[in-house]
Amino acid sequence: MLAPYTTLRLGGPAREFAEATTAERLVSLIADADRTAVPTLVLGGGSNVVVSDAGFDGLVIKVATRGVSVSRDGEQVLVTVEAGEDWDPFVARAVREGWSGIECMSGVPGQVGSTPIQNVGAYGQEVSQTVRCVRAYDRRTRQVVDLEARQCGFSYRDSAFKRDLARFVVLAVTYALDISEVSGPVAYQELAGRLRVELGDRVPLAQAREAVLGLRRGKGMVLDPDDPDTRSAGSFFTNPILTPEEAAELATRAPDHPRWEMPDGSLKVPAAWLIEQAGFSKGYERGPVRISTKHTLALTNPTGSATTTDLLALAREVRDGVREKFGVTLVNEPVLVGCALGE
């Protein structure tokens, strides 16, 4: 069963299962499967994936590669991290070492290899701001390639890797981090309030990390086996980014809705607000699944007794309720394997 390998504790069996402890082994497994036309699923920390109850009829490869190398580049360090390294311990090391640029992504579950795929971000920082290079296996050309940040197609919670999941397998990521004992400019109002500073201020790295961890714990977004709200895939829906026309339509239904203006003229709207205003409060239940009691963006399997079918039914109910009330269609953030929300 794949359920133990996901933070939702959901997912049926795999036909085959293998663990890759080196990049060479990972490439070899993928290449062999491609040659024999065996479907493959590359699984990292399982924190951003929803696997169907039927499981996966193919080869599941668990990424377990390890290694971190560091070099100096002027006032920055270049840190190359193998895909199987856990993300938060790497962030903790960066804070200890005085490497600035990823501290506000403390507590994000999962492995390093998934961060460029999802363009992971939190509290005003995104990995696209620090990624220098991604080493990946290109299944189309059957070559290991080094892709510079500009080739990764980063956008909000998206990338070239995510848009073509079947093509690239991330092997390692190189981050360019500032050598500094203080954080980057605080760019998220909730975090600024927690720190009691103004937007744009900088604080000691450890202070930023602890503030972020505190905020995340309060939302059930730091993995904790004793907290059923953390049996989730994190934020299930992304914050919608609306065109000016879509934003105008929403304004007719909710004139005072919260929003963030984007540089290209589009408007980002908080999905959590839309969900709450559509009548789905924290703790809202549908059978054995529920919205987190701490954060409306997380859908949870609190007792571990649910199925993926149960979870997707709740996700559809929330999505459809928001669309009916506001005319905005929420999009799932986790990758759905062998299942779909449908229309």
Image (cartoon, rainbow, N blue to C red):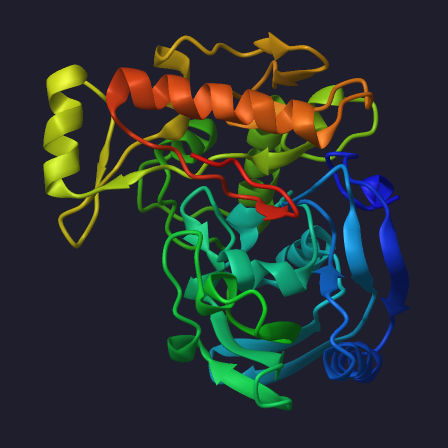
User: Where 54 sits versus 35, above or below?
Assistant: above
Compare residues 253 and 84 and report the one nearer the observer: 253
Image side of residue 40 versus residue 215, left or right:
right
User: Where 68 sits versus 314, above or below?
Assistant: below
Seen at 36% across and 59% down, the residue is: 155
Q: Is residue 265 visible?
A: yes
User: Where 164 sits versus 53, above or below?
Assistant: below
Compare residues 247 and 123 and report the one nearer the observer: 247
Q: Is residue 255 visible?
A: no
Report x, y in % for residue 167. Answer: 57, 74
Image side of residue 101 versus residue 270, left or right:
right
Figure quadrant of residue 24: bottom right
Quadrant of the frame with the C terminus? top left
Image side of residue 339 versus residue 13, left or right:
left
Report x, y in % for residue 218. Answer: 60, 22
Seen at 77% across and 41% down, the residue is: 54
Seen at 58% across and 90% down, the residue is: 141
How many numbered discs, if any?
0
User: Where 95 sits versus 109, above or below?
Assistant: below
Compare residues 57 and 321 and report the one nearer the observer: 57
Seen at 89% across and 61% down, the residue is: 16
Image side of residue 200 versus residue 336, left or right:
left
Report x, y in % for residue 279. Answer: 41, 8
